Amino acid sequence: MAQEHRNVLILGAAGRDFHNFNVVFRDDERCRVQAFTAFQIPGIAGRRYPPELSGPLYPDGIPIHDEAELAVLLRRYDVDEAVFSYSDVAYDELMHRASIVTAAGADFRLLGGRSSMIPAGKPVLSVCAVRTGAGKSQTSRAIAAMLRGRGRRVVVVRHPMPYDKDLAAQRVQRFAKLEDLDTHRCTIEEREDYEPHIVAGNVVYAGVDYAAILSAAEPEADVILWDGGNNDTPFYRPDLHVVLVDPHRAGHETRYWPGETNLRMADVVLVNKTGTATPEGIAAVQASAARLCPKATVVLADSEITVPDPAAIRGKRVLVVEDGPTVTHGEMPHGAGWVAAKRFGAAAIVDPRPFAVGSIRDTFATYGHLHDVLPAMGYGEAQMRELEQTIAAVPCDAVVVGTPVDLGRFLKIRQPQVKVSYELDAHGREGLERVLDRFLDGSA
């Protein structure tokens, strides 16, 4: 007897995978999603996508396995089709996954925007990038401020990071005050992206079900600002698509999925970090933009790095704590904290590796390019405590915090802290101002 449906496996990392399921597969009776796999983010395998979210075709929910079991899962579930659904993956790694899948006899699928982007009833402006750590956060904050300055109500919708075990409780999340971060038990990674928006006066939505999130967000918005994660494409169909390229990683814009897709879709290409990049790096990413999206407007920008008291760094032995995703799977050797430590005259940057404990030690083993910075890993309460213990063990005069979140709100740090801020520079803002005026006039 012929099989009544196609068996599907979705390869993910707790975000895009759930979105692709919700909009493409949840109600499709021709398919049965047998399982999700989990990668990139520690501690998210072993959960279950709950029946409250999976719909009537999945009364028991859907299991989530570690992607390390991929070859076994393809056989166990007699998979017909594997759908790759996470971001910031080098092309060779992407094709290794494809080879495992196709060797098992299954099809390997990538979803495009026509099937995965939800149309909105309000204008959507998206901020995405070709790699994580390119500067989306400060660009999104700057654009939100510009829109508010033009009398528009802006609601930020952030790329998902549902890392808690209770996925049903994270279906639709709204953040308007800092206490909401505690209410929703946010990880450090979530706080890094939500907290600066909240401090700036922006309402942020995130969660798991982005159709439901859009329905909740639209009544209080004139413009939806999609604040992307990693180098993923937007979940909503954008009316203006701003894409950041990073001249410190010139060439990456054509070597990572789906960063090149973002660049080819761009209406605006923002070349960030021009103040610290080489002329050759800047020229290379501009050449990529001219070749791949010749009709896009190109804006040159920098991220202005400031600290409240440079004397707290000068002459001191410092520990540098950086934004986790930027220096781990983003492959940057350092971030804004390291730049600030060097710029403001630290006597030494202490290597944190000998003092790392638990999963923080494992992170250094996984990402061997890291030497003198500590990634702010905090994908759960246990890892936050290990980060806290690691910081406490490092012999230093001060902790330079390069992550955008205030670590002192939820970690006990005995050493003096120096918080690094970074905002889009005036030149970059001027270029975006002109783009936004055309967008709001309906001619962008």
Image (cartoon, rainbow, N blue to C red):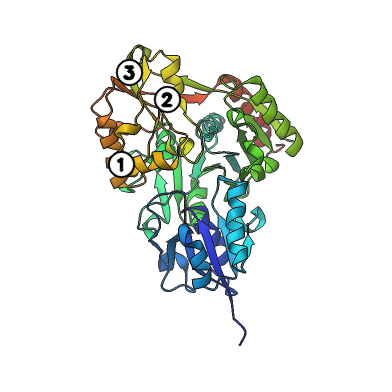
Quadrant holding the N terminus: bottom right
Residue 109 visible here: yes
Q: Horizontal placement of 2 versus 309: left or right?
A: right
Q: The residue tagged with tag 3: helix, strand or loop?
A: strand
In the displayed structure, 66 sits above or below 442; it is below
The residue nearer to you, when weighing 206 against 376, is 376
Q: Earlier in the sequence, mark 3 or mark 2?
A: 3
Q: Residue 101, how many percent across, how many down?
A: 59, 63
**Three-letter code for the amino acid on which mark 3 is drawn:** Arg
The label on residue 384 is: 1
Q: Residue 244, how many percent across, how many down?
A: 60, 34
Marks 2 and 1, how far apart at CA: 19 Å
**Three-letter code for the amino acid on which mark 2 is drawn:** Gly
The label on residue 337 is: 2
Q: Residue 361, how many percent across, how many down?
A: 34, 40
The label on residue 135 is: none
Foreground tag (3 vs 2): 3
Q: What residue does disc 3 label?
A: 317
The residue located at (35%, 24%) in the rendering is 350
Figure quadrant of residue 441: top right
